[in-house]
Image: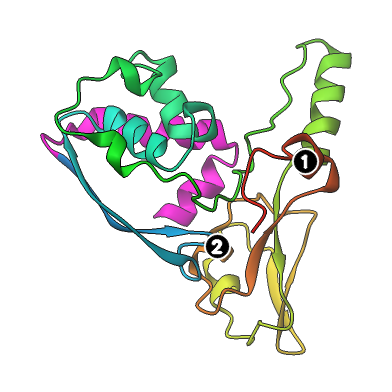
Amino acid sequence: MKPEYHYRFPNPNDFADMIVDLDEYWKPVLHICDAVTAMEGNGPTQGTPKHVGCLIASKNPHRLDVLAASLIGLTPSDVPTIAAAVRRNLTPESVDEIEIAGDWKSFLQEDFELIRNRNSLLFVGGNNVFGRTVRGAMNACLASKPKVKTSACVGCGKCRDICPAHTIAIKNKKAVIDRRHCIKCFCCQEFCPVGAMGVHRSPVAKLLTHGKESSK
C-alpha cells in the first residue's frame, strides 16, 4: 500500500505525519535497527554497502531514528519522520538528550555518502497570496525530482507499474516521466532493479547545500 499512500499524501511532511500516526496507533513494544551493514548513495536498489557494525534497539522508534540519523550525519530536519516526531514531542531533537547504553560515538560515520532529501530545502514563506506564490515558485525551483538514466534503463516497466500517479511510460524501451503529474514520491527510484532512476537536483539547490553533503 506504500505507493497508494504516497499518492494520497504527496507532500513529504504529510506523508511523514502519516508514518508517525501508524507508529503511535500500533505501538510496537520493541524497535530494532540493523546497522551492521548500511547503504550509502543511490539506495535502496543501487546503493553501496558500507560497514558500520552497529545494532540499535529501543522502545521508542523516534529516539532510535534520531540516533541512527546522527551516526551518518543527518539532522532531524533532514528526515521528515523525525521532524514530525519532534514537532509532536515524541522525541528530543538532539541525540545528546537521549539516554543511550553503550559507546555510540564509536560508530559515527564521518564520510557517509548522502543524497540530500528532497524537502530539506522547502521554502516556507507567508500565508498571504504573495507568500503562497513565492513559496510555490521557490519549492518548484528547489525540489529534487526523479530522473531517468537512459543509458542504464532496460525498459522493464517496473517503474511504470509501481508509479502511484501513473506518470511513467515506456517508449522505445526506455522509461519516460510525465513531469506535469509527477508527485516526486521516488517510488520509481526505490524499486528500479538496475538503478536507472536517480535523484536530480537543480543547480540552485546544489548551490545552497554546497559543502553540506558528499561530493562523491
The answer to which of marks 1 and 2 sits earlier in the sequence is 2
* Residue nearest the viewer, comparing 127 with 151: 151
Residue occupying image coordinates x 86% and y 23%: 134
Q: Label 2's element?
A: loop
How far from the left and from the top, in percent, is residue 111?
Answer: 50, 49
Q: How is the image coloured?
A: rainbow
Given contact means CB atoms under 8 Å apart, are the residues at marks 1 and 2 in contact? no
The residue shown at (54%, 59%) is 41
How far from the left and from the top, in percent, is residue 55? 20, 48
In the image, what residue type sits under mark 2? Asn
Q: Which residues are magenta?
A: 1-30
Name the amino acid type tagged 1. Answer: Ala
Residue 110 horizontal/vertical position (percent):
47, 44
- Does the magenta stretch mainly form a helix, a strand or a loop? helix
Residue under label 1, please give it.
205
In the image, is residue 13 part of the stretch drawn in magenta?
A: yes
Q: Which residue is mark 2?
A: 42
Residue located 50% across and 71% down the image: 46
On the image, the x and y values in percent for residue 144 come to 71, 48
Callout 2 crowding tier (Cα within 10 Å): few <14, some 14–19, many ≥20: some
Q: Is residue 84 left or right of residue 186?
A: left
